[in-house]
Amino acid sequence: MSADIETQAVDRSDLSDEVMIQITGMNKWFGDFHVLRDINLTVFQGERIVICGPSGSGKSTLIRCINRLEEHQQGQIIVDNVELTNDLKQIDQVRREVGMVFQHFNLFPHLTVLENCTLAPIWVRDTPKVDAEQAAMEYLARVKIPEQAEKYPGQLSGGQQQRVAIARSLCMNPKIMLFDEPTSALDPEMIKEVLDVMVDLAETGMTMIVVSHEMGFARQVAHRVIFMDDGQVVEQNEPEEFFNNPQSDRTKLFLSQILSH
Amino acid sequence: MADTTGSGANRAFVRTETLPQAPPPLSTRGWIGWLRENLFSSPLNAALTIGALYVLYLFVPPLIEWAIIEAVWTGASNADCKGHDGACWAIVPARFGQFIYGFYPEAERWRADLVFILFCINVAPILSDRLPGRTFAALFIVSGFPIVAGLILFGGIGLEAVPTDRWGGLLLTLVLAVVSILFSLPLGILLALGRRSEMPIVSTFSIAFIELCRAVPLITVLFMASFMLPLFLPEGVNFNELLRALIGVTIFASAYMAEVVRGGLQALPKGQTEAAQALGLTYWQAMRLIIMPQALKIVIPGIVNTFISLFKDTSLVSIIGLFDLLLVAKASVTDPKWLGLEHEAYIFTALLYFVFCFGMSRYSLWLEGKLNTERRD
Ligand SMILES: Nc1ncnc2c1ncn2[C@@H]1O[C@H](COP(=O)(O)OP(=O)(O)OP(=O)(O)O)[C@@H](O)[C@H]1O
Ligand SMILES: [Mg+2]
């Protein structure tokens, strides 16, 4: 089904050489616990990266550092030419350009689906309400649930909620989208509907960093797969190489474990 | 991942639809069914029911006889009640003015009524969701309204000045309750946020403030506000007794409110704040638009509970010589004309307290029900 897209995924020619995210020598500790060790990562505009690795390896922490939900202690993170420091203005500036989708959706349960989508554009981007609503409806149509706009999140299925969460982030017109295990809280039959939306998004040229163990998705859309273990980037490669010809023993072990399921 | 879920659904022996409900048997329907189920479901339950009925039989008929059948409703003094074996309600109409307004001059009482009406107009859009302008009303009630109400009640410009030591009765009780309720909620919210703040100075101050206020009785706070505050103020600066009591009660209540609100904040998953941050909302936007609406909704019962106990606690101001509703009632029966009518005076007072507290309680129930329809999960 995805044979042609697979070849396209390896093709990096659609990448610009404009750097979107530049992480150099980054270290992070939780108290005494050294959770991220000397991370170096460059992400180009339009690049799609899938991060995998065992539980507790620091995948979530890494992408949460990119929009400063976690603070790093050493090294440098530059997102869209803005360095993340303690400067709140710069943090806000980065967060406006970086969308994030969480494992547990984190929709606002007291607001309708439409209000979830229009809140940030109205308050953060000062978009007039009618324009925000119109844009929100377009994005809801893109994630294929425009008819749910007036419902509350609690009335939707998990897959629908996650698609709303994606639409909510897209409404801010972000330059980068971060996904933290977007499908791992979903029942199997809902995983596909969310992945389909993400594949659609990938085709628009969005810069995406996806923490996921959905290897089919990685093969289909990723330019690069990164394997993390113990707070370090152990290995990274193009998907075909990564899956067919893993270099390190840890990667091999990990792949054998997840692929055996 | 191993797919173990959902495999039971296609087994032949598992029924896939729910059966329609059968109607309940006749003996469980209607009032007979209700009685049987609620009052006579077991021998013990039946014995308790009969015992309770007997106790009611002992107390209720004499009470009705005293309070209604034998009661005297009008009269100029307790002399008119002599020879009757019932309540002497005549004290209520005779002293109604004092109960409601204290020593507020009779000719000026319309001002208190006016403030009450203005308050109702201001509070209506906040309480109801059918009226427009909730945000404006909520901001006005803690900014413009107290000033307007203070000017009308206190007078001075164009109106006869009525110093606060002449305010009393229900008027004073309501002033104390409304002001402390209105200001303790926002203050409590700020303190609760402060307590969870990542800035050490802010959180230390908030914790110290909350713990200090909760560790002393309200009476102590009132005594301090009344007698000790003047010691710290420069010579000649002497601010109003009522204002000091208001500040004392409000500060005290805000500490309790802070803990109630904190309970709501803790009940919210961290993901809500993170989602708000990830969307680029500032801290205050996230609090106002995402966190507080949810946290406050969770703790509505706790908030209203604090309001109700606050309303009743205002009666402690009589300790520092303010003539609130309770003290007025107490004073009214020291009048030789109405000597010995404590029962009547206090029952009437209790009824007034009940009306307001019960009203708040019902409102909170209604509000909870309304907010719950917004979310079904
Ligand atoms: N706020 C925190 N305080 C202390 N330790 C933390 C905190 N958050 C995460 N950790 C620890 O840091 C390590 C990395 O966590 P992280 O959530 O990044 O892992 P992960 O790779 O995303 O794992 P998973 O696949 O389970 O989501 C874990 O050992 C975790 O226990
Ligand atoms: Mg994780």
Image: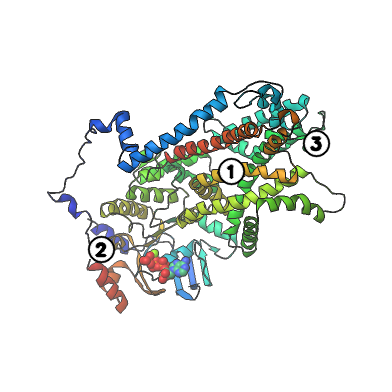
- Kindly indicate whether the residues beneath marks 3 and 1 are on one polypeptide chain: yes
Q: Is residue A91 left or right of residue B377?
A: right
Residue at 70% x, 53% y is B220
Q: Is residue B130 above or below residue B323?
A: above
Q: Earlier in the sequence, mark 1 or mark 2?
A: 2
Give the structural element (helix, strand or loop) at label 1.
helix
Q: Quadrant of the N terminus of chain B?
A: bottom left
The yes-or-no answer for disc 3 within 8 Å of ligand 1 is no
Residue at 30% x, 35% y is B36
Residue B282 x/y as whole percent: 56, 53
Report the residue that reaches farthest toward the right.
Answer: B236
Residue A20 x/y as whole percent: 47, 62
Callout 3, which amino acid?
A: Pro
Per the model, the C-alpha gap separating discs 1 and 2 is 52 Å
Residue A60 x/y as whole percent: 41, 65
Per the model, the C-alpha gap separating discs 3 and 1 is 27 Å
| Mark closer to the observer (1, 2) | 1
- Nearer to the camera, A230 or B139: B139
Which residue matches tag 1?
Answer: B307
Subunit bearing disc 1: B
* Residue B100 marker: none
Which residue matches tag 2?
Answer: B1
Q: Earlier in the sequence, mark 3 or mark 1?
A: 3
- Nearer to the camera, B272 or B195: B195
Residue A131 x/y as whole percent: 49, 39
